[in-house]
Amino acid sequence: MTPAPTGPDPRGTPTLGSLTGGQLRRLGAVAGLSRADVETYAGVLTDALGTMAERPLSLAPPTRTFLSDDHTPVEFSLSFRPDAEPSMRLLVEPGCGADSLVRNGRTGLEAIRAMARRWDFTTDVLDELQDLFLPPVPRGPLALWCALELRPGGVPRVKVYLNPAAGGEERSAATVREALHRLGHRRAFDGLPQGGGYPFLALDLGDWAEPRVKVYVRHDNLTAGQAGRLSRMDSGPGPAAVEGFFRTAAGLGPDATGLGRRPGLSCHSFTDTGTVRPSGFTLHIPVRDYVRHDGEALARASRVLRHHGMDASVLDRALAALTERRPEDGVGLIAYLALAHQQDQPPRVTAYLSSEAYAVRPPAVGTVRRPLPVS
């Protein structure tokens, strides 16, 4: 990776907070948020980063975080629906400056509880699972991440991402099963598809119409045909729709062997404790590992957005809000593309966008297959 250009900072030395706060402000304007809202949310980001917000970018990343390829503890995303402004989201690791995984988790938990006091929501479901995901001697690649859906009005929706391998990779399945059971979804685990592991469990906290428990499943060497069979929703997407998205996002034709580098992820959302079936399904494709550069990733994302009746030009403006570099000059600015289905709602397309505060991954050398059209 090459160092990321930081650009001038009006206060002097560029810092993690000044760079990511500026990106948030510009991206928020693209997403249609008011100036007052983006200033509020920039302050929320600064609070979440704590003392790391003032850390100069000339220093190495505070932690080798699993959150991004260059170890920036911040990621942005835009979620698109037809005939609507995109929804902007922020993912942050509040404990990124901690010197151990256990302190990372404690700092993250304190940050979530501070948000709960500020926005008047409870952390009961998180507290119920604390011993499973934040044990005295945690293991795995992360402790706690916080995602914020940045709504108009300055009060976000909050999500927490937890590590099922905190008690050991070999216990991940048992940890997910136990967590679902404690939260009332006693038959949900049996409704999940087979996979290679469980990288995340996520909880909606606060002001959600139907709070979700989301389980992520890793799929090594995933093929289009396999992807089309992953949904477990009663009225979810048909296999052809999922396969079409897979082929376009991954750039793999019908004869390809599958995602042989970074694996795909499926996400299964549970809201009804009375059924084994999830109410939502999302397929995540790590597009950055299957393109030569971000120009190709942008072209694929635009094709998916247009297919679903969404404004692809917004994504062009979003990339320009994050960086001055050309998409062809690096790879990883668009990290994932996801197609989400939720019961009784139209499909959503989400683009996950990297801050690249510390480094830009050089373009890949070699031939990448041209994607098939979305069908």
Image: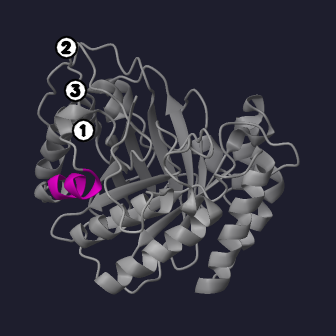
Q: Residue at x 43, y 36 (%)?
A: 230
The residue indicated by pointer 3 is 251
User: Disc 3 residue type?
Assistant: Gly
Specify the farthest residue to the front: 12
Tell me which label, 1 or 3, sits earlier in the chain: 1
Give the class, few, some or many, for how many residues have Cα within 10 Å of label 3's Cα (few <14, many ≥20): many
Residue 19 highlighted magenta (yes or no): no
Left or right for 214, reference 177: left
> Which residues are the magenta region?
316-323
Nearer-the-camera pick, 117 or 241: 117
Tell me which label, 1 or 2, sits earlier in the chain: 1
Contact between marks 3 and 2 (CB within 8 A): the answer is no
Up/down of 245 relative to 12, above or below? above
Left or right for 131, reference 164: right
Real-space CA distance between mark 3 and mark 2, rounded to the nearest whole angstrom: 11 Å
Q: Nearer the viewer, mark 1 or mark 3?
A: 3
Real-space CA distance between mark 1 and mark 2, rounded to the nearest whole angstrom: 21 Å
The residue indicated by pointer 1 is 245
Q: Residue at x 47, y 38 (%)?
A: 70
Label drawn at residue 367: 2
* Quadrant of res 123: bottom right
